[in-house]
Image (cartoon, helix red, strand yellow):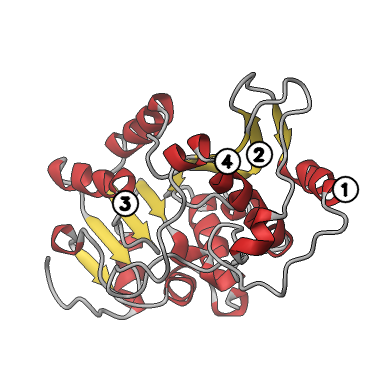
Amino acid sequence: MDGDPRLPPHHLRDWLEAHARIFILTGAGCSTGSGIPDYRGPDGAWKRPPPVTYQAFTSERATYQRYWARSFTGWPRFDGARPGPAHVALAALQASGRAPTLVTQNVDGLHQRAGGHEVIDLHGRLDRVVCLACAAALPRASLQSRMADANAAWGPPLAKQAPDGDADVDDAAAAAFVPPFCDQCGGSLKPDVVFFGENVPRRRYEHARDALLAATAMLVAGSSLMVYSGFRFARMAREAGLPLAIVNRGHTRADDLATLRVDAEVGGALAAAVLPPDARR
């Protein structure tokens, strides 16, 4: 990596202004300013137990039941989240014409709510639900109402919010929760996101890859890149000879690939680099 890993935001502003077609990859650090917790600390290690795997979700009834109990509890706060400074700054960067495609590892839709366009939701969206048996789809908000009706007498103690609409619910409360099933075929329901143990859909990956190969530089914002589905784009950028800037608080998996590294809270750094002073918040 070239230079000081703790460069101030004006270096980022200069870097952004020097490139005409920037491919953006974002992660959980962009949404912490919106009240959505992240998974990892500054050293890249898990802050909490890893998320449920696809294999456990689909093969273990207790895991399926526990997942939906936690999701039911965490959904209201997740659904109420609003775009933060990172989302606003990146939407402004896209509006300038210098960042035609934004790929996010987040599942919250906040880039779109901030006005982002050409957003590729690499890991899917939590506000959609699909049936694993018949592929019927429905909005997550409508499923919340169904779960509330089926669990009218159920109520866990106050729960701590967790990443991606999850919440900590004890095992006894989870075991009493009535989980949802498809109202068309009775099949299991799953949020339309990529679980651990699943692969990003091929066409979605290819869309993101093609956007990267058409770019002149790559910016990583708010991701430790510990998950390979994101890290591989940083590696591809370096192999293609593209300048790579990373803005993240703490260590990332691609630090040695970066040509610019800003170790800072991503919302503040991006706002200072992109937005005029009267638009920063």
111 sits left or right of 195 in the view? right
Q: What amino acid is at disc 1? A: Asp
Across and down, in percent, residue 145 comes to 84, 47
Name which of mark 3 and mark 4 comes first in the sequence: 4
Mark 4 neighbour density, 10 Å: few (under 14) some (14–19) many (20 or more): few
Q: Nearer the viewer, residue 91 or 104?
A: 104
Residue where numbered disc 2 is placed:
128
> Is residue 160 among the parts visible in the rendering?
yes
- x, y percentage for residue 263? 30, 76
Q: What element carries label 2?
A: strand
The kind of secondary structure element at disc 3 is loop
Task: Return the residue nearer the eye: 241 or 55.
Answer: 55
Residue at 32%, 62% (x, y): give it.
224
Q: In the image, what residue type sits under mark 3?
A: Val
Task: Judge the density around disc 1: few (<14), some (14-19), many (≥20) Cα neighbours within 10 Å.
Answer: few
- Per the rendering, the mark at residue 61 is 4
Where residue 110 sits, quadrant-wise, is bottom right
